[in-house]
Amino acid sequence: MATGTEPPHLAPGRGVHDASRAAIAARHLRTDRWWLAPAATAAGLLAFVVYSTWRAFANADYYAAPYVSPFYSPCLAENCVPMKGGPNWEIFGSWWGLSPALLILIFPLGFRLTCYYYRKAYYRGFWASPPACAVAEPHGSYSGETRFPLILQNAHRYFFYTALPVAGILTYDTVLAFRDETYAWGHAGLGTVVFLVNIVLIWAYTLSCHSCRHIVGGRLKHFSKHPVRYRLWTWVGKLNTRHMQLAWASLFSVALADLYVYLLATGAFDDPRIF
């Protein structure tokens, strides 16, 4: 029963502080450093946002033969630097004066922003909704993803369809990474390894997506009648159990691939050759 003298976090309100809920004096009963995980998540995502924003608007140092930054591929405008053998489609012609990265990054970023794991990550890290298990969120009400802008999260399955061709193009770029600076085949440098690791992680993250799991095995009443789809569903399901780790690993690898190309393009060092 409310007496009018309760501390602010116990005053009658909405959500977990509704009058119908038990009034617990402590804000939470956790004794561990529960705030470390959401703080680290927020710091990691913020660092990527800052770095990717800088690189996307830089419009420079994204090609060092034979490597092209994954932030800028495919090139869809005339203001792209010449990339011999690269995916230069120039669909937007000469009227596009901004960085060409802004034309392509919307698709992989949209896929990640609406990803089920990343939702959990930034809901906890930035919005404290809730900040951690068994820790009450500070918001008085919760409408879920039924209103703007969070209702846009439902577009995840459609962003998955756009993420597939992007991954395919990055695979093509990785194949081109087996050329040397004269575009002769049979080369492998440190950049080749960086691109190989990145594309493996990109595909693993993309295929471990919940939407992919639903596409290959959803809406089936009898798995026994669809052995191929059942096999694919179980394989994607195994990847899905590592979706969080793959999300972070691929986020780091794509940034590393871009940074590596940037360092080569600015002359920080030469690509160490393996063979």
Image (cartoon, rainbow, N blue to C red):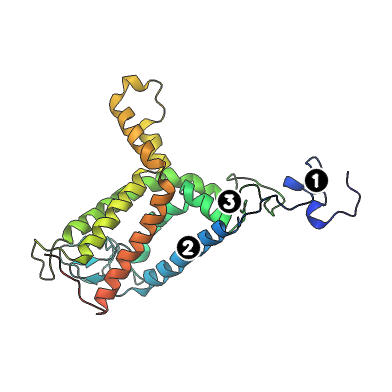
The amino acid at mark 1 is Ala
Mark 2 or mark 3: which is in front? Answer: 2
Report whether 257 appears left or right of 33. left
Within 10 Å of disc 2 (Cα), the crowding (few <14, some 14-19, many 20+) is some
Within 10 Å of disc 3 (Cα), the crowding (few <14, some 14-19, many 20+) is few
Q: Estimate the x, y position of residue 14 in percent, counting from the top left.
A: 76, 47
What residue is rendered at 27% in x and 63% in y? 75
Q: Circle 1 — which element?
A: loop
Q: Quadrant of residue 194?
A: bottom left
Q: Estimate the x, y position of residue 160 in percent, counting from the top left.
A: 38, 46
Q: Which residue is mark 3?
A: 148
Q: Circle 3 — which element?
A: loop
Q: Which residue is mark 1?
A: 23
Residue farthest toward the bottom in the current orientation of the protein:
267
Within 10 Å of disc 1 (Cα), the crowding (few <14, some 14-19, many 20+) is some
Give the tally of numbered discs: 3
Mark 3 or mark 1: which is in front? Answer: 1
Q: Earlier in the sequence, mark 2 or mark 3?
A: 2
Q: CA distance from mark 2 to mark 1?
A: 35 Å
Q: Which residue is mark 2?
A: 44
